[in-house]
Structure formats: structure tokens, C-alpha cells
């Protein structure tokens, strides 16, 4: 009688009580040495060796962002499930709570600061235009627990039916590299005083050699002046109510103007989108500090501005793919900050793994890499405790990278989809409103307008 087949696998993790502290293959992006460094600099290293050392707690918080449907005790079981041959300590949910509280916010913020950045080189496909790194700033909201103290600090949204509704929310504003969708910097806080005010904290990460894409919400005189003072260039959408003066016309149809004390070029264009369902035309206006019409033609600037939507793709990956639109676990303000930094850190680690993989294929655009494929592969590696410590042979791509490269998406096609509330209060609303929610392939035409400033009534779609 033949014996049963036996599959054996070597698992390399840290020794002793540090063994549960890992992030699968992503540990190579967030290595032990990096975590130990931020713990030392933050003064968060434990005074005595506990069952839950500070390094293990950091990795627990990071791993929790990969398994948002689980409580922390269930995440612990995923971290230790493949370590059954090791003397892993038994912990309780209460012990995990105390460990997270002891750790605090500073180590997680410092860890994110070490990882944040464009995750690209000058030759990475799709990241630069005319020698400038293309970046975008925009904001989104994260739902947090409806705890009394949190609600008192953050407030709640309102609608026409009630003075307060839904969950309290944190306003998250990120500076994103459009080519890789990596986070260069991020800030968060209460909904008020609003995006332009909170977003000014991102100016620390702007520098010469960047072109910053901004929507109309950020195109205030003060914010545009601040971006210019940071030596970065901007390309911003303007509302139709503005009346910028025409100081000089250029051959490409744009004209020289001034916003506050900042000298800008104004580009007015008419964009027509045609699908099988019909045609839609809108008039748009952009302002930029890129004043040379020969080096930065108006038509090309309009095309570049479309890259601003990459920041929305980054938020979709965080809120839909990672969070599954769930409310954050934490019920205290320090816990919320700790959880958001962990979320941003793991998101950035996945983007770094994607960028590293696509960089091994000449001309491969990171846009073609599937974030979902990388995310699910990273989860599997955590459960298997695989790839925690690099082998003697350096693998530049890794298991996550190979999964991404094996499932590269086709080059993006132009498609349009109506902007609509994804979770309406009534599931019958779309029937009564007769909203067409289908996505269509489209063709687009851009015409630079040679007339003077447009009037509000001619402003169609808005930017």
C-alpha cells in the first residue's frame, strides 16, 4: 500500500515572539529593519519583551488593512495560521486592543512617511509629460464609527431631510503620482474647513519639475498662489464665473492672463464626446503656469488634464478594493489616525510592488497592472507566511509581481459612464429618473476656442 503524498514547505519568519510580525511578501517592501527604525525614532519600542512586541503590532495593523472584513483577532489567526509548528503565543481581543493603544499613531505615520513617493523613475512609462512629473491633488471621504466622541469632533453630514445623517467622515486629501497612482503625500482631518485649506499641508511635497492637476474646488486664488510659491507648475480647471483678463493672445489659441498675482495661460476648449447613445458637448477652461505655448501646446495640455482622474482610480482602489466601502474599525480619534496611516502604507506598498514588476518589462505602463490581482495575491502571501524573508537569490519581481505581469490589462480604451450615486437611498430611484447607467465606448474631439472668455451659460459639463 503506497503512502499518502506529503507536501512540505519551508517558512522563514522572524524568531520567537516576533514570528507573527510579517506581511507576507510585502514584508520585503516594509522590512523588519524599517519597522524597527520607526519604532526606535518614535520611542515606541517596548521596555520589556511582551507576547505582543511593538514590531508585531505594527504588522498586525498593516495586515488588518488587507482583511477589512475581519476583526483584529481574526487577522491574528491569518498571520499565525501557517506558523502552527512554532510556539506562537495565544492572545485575546483585549490584549490586541491594549497593544494597539500602547503603540500610538507616531510609528504608523513615520512608516508611511518612509514609503510615500511617486514609486517611479524618470523613464517609467506614462509618469512624465514634457519632462514634468504629472501629479494630482484631490480629496475623498472615509466613513468612521458613529461614536459619540468621534461625532462631536468630526460632525455628520446633512441633507434635505435631516440636520445630520450617515456616518461621521474624515476628509482625506492626497497628492498622487498619476502615472503609478502612488501616494506622494496625504493629509486628513475633519470635513471643515474644507479641501483647499486642509490641502495646503501638501505643499511641503511640491517642488520644481512637477505639474499639479487640480479641479475647480482647489482653484482658489490663495491655493494657486501657494502652489506657484512652491516652485511647482499647475494645470487647474476654472469655473465659468471667473473673468480672467486677456493680456496677450498666443498662436495656439490660449491667452496670457493673471490670477491674483500669478501669471497664467488660459486655455478654453470645446470637448465633444460621441457614443452610440448620442453626442455631448461641453466648454471648459483651464489655467496653467506653463506659459510657453511652443513647449506646452494648448491641445496637449487639455489631453494631459484628463490624467487628473488617476487620483480617483487611487481612491477607488483604497475605498472599494481594500475597504469594500466599509466603515473604519477604530472608534477613537487616535485609533482612526492609526488605521488610516496603516491603510495608506499598505496601499503604497502594493503600488511599489506593481511599479517594480512593470519596470522589468520595457515600455510597460503601470496603468495596465491590476491592483485587485496584486491585492489578492498579497493576501494569499500573508495567509501562507510566504516570501517574508528574501532568499539568497534576489527575485526582483516576486510572486505578487508575476501575478500582475501574468494578468496585464489591455491598453486603456476611451469609455464614458454617467456620474451617479452608487448607493442611492431607494433602489427604485434610477427607474423613476430613467438614468442610463451603461458604459459606452466613445470617441472624443477637442477644439481650442479662439474667442474671449466664455459666459456662465455656455459652460456645459464643467471641470
Image (cartoon, grey):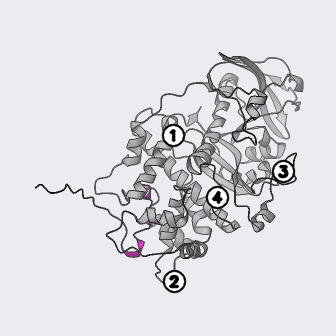
| Horizontal relation, residue 354 to residue 210: left or right | left
Badges 2 and 3: C-beta atoms under 8 Å apart? no
Residue beneath label 3, please?
158
Image quadrant in which the C terminus is located: top right
Q: Circle 2 sits in a helix, a strand or a loop, which is it?
A: loop
Q: Residue at x 47, y 70 (%)?
A: 56
| Residue 314 visible in rendering | yes
Residues under labels 4 and 1: Cα distance? 36 Å
Q: Which mark is residue 122?
A: 1
Q: Circle 4 sits in a helix, a strand or a loop, which is it?
A: loop
Q: Position of residue 188 (x, y in %)?
A: 70, 56
Q: Kindly report which numbered mark, 3 or 1, lies closer to the viewer in this rendering.
A: 3
Image: 52 above or below 305: below
Q: Residues within 10 Å of mark 2 (few under 14, many from 20)?
A: few
The residue lying toward the viewer, choosing from 26 and 328, is 328
Residue beneath label 2, please?
47
Amino acid at each position: 500500500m503506497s503512502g499518502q503524498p506529503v507536501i512540505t514547505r519551508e517558512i522563514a519568519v522572524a524568531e520567537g515572539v516576533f514570528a507573527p510580525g510579517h506581511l507576507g511578501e510585502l514584508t520585503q517592501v516594509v522590512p523588519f529593519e524599517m519597522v524597527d527604525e520607526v519604532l526606535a525614532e518614535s520611542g515606541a519600542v517596548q521596555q520589556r519583551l511582551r507576547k505582543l512586541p511593538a514590531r508585531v503590532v505594527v504588522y498586525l495593523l498593516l495586515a488588518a488593512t488587507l482583511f477589512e472584513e475581519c476583526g483584529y483577532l481574526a487577522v491574528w489567526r491569518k498571520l499565525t495560521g501557517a506558523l502552527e509548528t512554532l510556539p506562537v503565543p495565544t492572545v485575546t481581543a483585549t490584549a490586541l486592543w491594549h497593544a494597539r493603544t500602547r503603540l500610538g499613531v507616531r510609528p504608523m505615520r513615520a512608516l508611511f512617511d518612509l514609503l510615500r513617493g511617486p514609486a517611479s523613475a524618470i523613464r517609467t512609462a506614462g509618469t512624465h509629460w514634457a519632462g514634468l512629473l504629472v501629479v494630482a491633488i484631490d480629496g475623498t471621504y472615509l466613513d468612521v464609527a458613529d461614536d459619540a466622541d468621534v461625532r462631536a469632533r468630526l460632525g455628520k453630514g446633512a441633507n434635505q431631510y435631516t440636520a445630520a445623517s450617515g456616518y461621521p467622515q474624515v476628509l482625506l486629501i492626497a497628492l498622487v503620482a498619476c502615472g503609478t497612482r502612488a501616494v506622494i503625500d496625504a493629509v486628513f482631518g475633519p470635513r471643515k474647513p474644507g479641501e483647499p485649506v486642509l490641502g495646503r499641508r501638501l505643499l511641503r511635497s511640491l517642488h520644481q519639475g512637477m505639474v499639479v492637476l487640480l479641479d475647480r474646488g482647489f482653484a482658489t486664488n490663495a491655493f494657486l498662489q501657494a502652489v506657484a510659491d512652491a516652485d511647482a507648475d499647475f494645470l487647474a480647471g476654472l469655473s465659468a464665473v471667473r473673468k480672467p483678463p486677456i493680456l496677450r493672445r498666443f498662436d495656439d489659441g490660449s491667452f496670457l492672463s493673471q490670477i491674483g498675482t500669478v501669471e497664467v495661460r488660459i486655455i478654453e476648449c470645446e470637448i465633444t464626446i460621441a457614443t452610440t447613445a448620442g453626442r455631448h458637448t461641453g466648454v471648459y477652461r483651464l489655467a496653467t503656469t506653463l506659459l510657453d505655448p511652443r513647449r506646452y501646446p494648448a491641445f496637449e495640455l487639455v489631453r494631459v488634464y484628463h490624467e487628473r482622474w488617476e487620483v480617483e482610480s487611487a481612491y477607488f482602489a483604497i475605498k472599494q478594493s481594500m475597504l469594500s466601502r466599509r466603515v473604519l474599525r477604530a472608534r477613537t480619534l487616535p485609533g482612526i489616525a492609526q488605521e488610516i496611516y496603516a491603510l495608506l502604507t499598505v496601499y503604497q506598498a502594493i503600488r511599489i510592488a506593481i511599479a517594480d514588476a512593470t519596470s522589468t518589462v520595457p515600455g510597460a505602463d503601470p496603468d495596465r497592472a491590476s491592483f485587485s490581482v496584486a491585492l489578492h495575491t498579497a493576501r494569499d502571501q500573508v495567509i501562507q507566511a510566504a516570501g517574508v524573508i528574501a532568499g539568497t537569490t534576489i527575485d526582483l519581481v516576486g510572486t505578487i509581481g508575476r501575478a500582475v505581469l501574468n494578468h496585464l490589462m489591455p491598453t486603456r480604451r476611451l469609455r464614458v459612464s454617467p456620474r451617479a450615486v452608487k448607493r442611492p437611498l431607494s433602489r427604485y430611484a434610477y427607474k423613476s429618473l430613467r438614468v442610463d447607467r451603461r458604459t459606452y465606448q466613445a470617441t472624443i474631439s477637442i477644439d481650442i476656442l479662439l474667442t474671449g472668455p466664455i459666459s456662465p451659460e455656455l459652460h456645459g459639463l464643467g471641470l
